[in-house]
Image: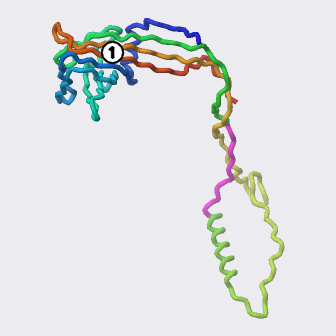
Amino acid sequence: MKKRILKGIGAAAVLAALVGCNEINFSGLLNIAEPITFANQSRAIVTIPAGQYQTKATIGQSGSQKQITLELKNGNQPTKVQISFDKNISIGENFDLTAAQIGQNFDVKGTMKTAVTNSPDQSGWESCTYQRPQTVCRGPEKSAQDKANEASLNSNAAALAQTDLPADRTAPEASNPVMADRPGPYPGPYPGPYPGPTCSTIWVTQYGNQNVTYHYQTTTRDLNASFVQGAKTLGTYTGQSSDTQKIYTFQGQCY
């Protein structure tokens, strides 16, 4: 499948990714030539012996600080160390964090190359939702007097139903009921205009389909970092991050 590739995104794009709240996760290898002692944010001291470790590196931001977190696969219990520094320290395609900036006894120098790959456009139909207005009407609220009269009638009816009749008598059949004219939205047999139903518009969620055009955008970052103390390189880290997003270039009407 042919792909369009944009390389050399530059320091501005890398910096924008780090300033936001999103984290960048790398998978790679940490090679320690000589034991490295890390001072964690809690000031706990962690020493990593010489060796090679499968390591997840996370670059992100918390509050006023940027953070680089290393999680080493070291036996059953992974070892985690964290390097913190001020959020205003820029990280570009090439970076050089000094010992004073990160609160460690070594510098961290390296590069982070970014490449963006776009797949060809694709078209199709997808499910979607939209809002449709709907008019809803409700009858007028009963007044307090109407509610009291209704309760009284119900009470009297219940009392009559429980009255014992003489053995030689039966209850008279009720005549066919006739509904009295009830005041409505227009003047009725009783004086004055009466309130009609109250109507309002609500928005109802509807399910439908829409025609779309889209492509997949994959951002790949290659991280190479060295832990340097004076003229000596204590260790190196090499890792890669890959993230894919679906990018819409057209979204038709949902119906």
Q: Is residue 1 magenta?
A: no
Tell me if I can see residue 52 in this picture. yes
Question: Mark 1 = which residue?
Answer: 238
What's the magenta region? Answer: 133-144
Q: What residue type is disc 1 on?
A: Thr
Residue at x 21%, y 11% (from the top left corner):
233
Residue at image point 34% right, 24% down: 56
Vertical placement of residue 11 versus 141, above or below:
above
Residue 255 location in percent, x, y?
70, 30
Residue plotted at (29% across, 21% down) = 68
For residue 39, what is the image quadrant? top left
In the rendered structure, the answer to whether residue 20 lies left or right of residue 176 reads: left
Q: How is the image coloured?
A: rainbow
Q: Is residue 227 left or right of residue 197?
A: left
- Provide residue 252's location: percent of width, then percent of height: 67, 22
Q: Position of residue 76 (x, y in %)?
A: 29, 35
Q: Is residue 146 depicted above or below 116 in this figure?
A: below
User: Could you say which quadrant of the image residue 110 lies in?
Assistant: top left
Considering the image in quadrants, where does the N terminus appear? top right
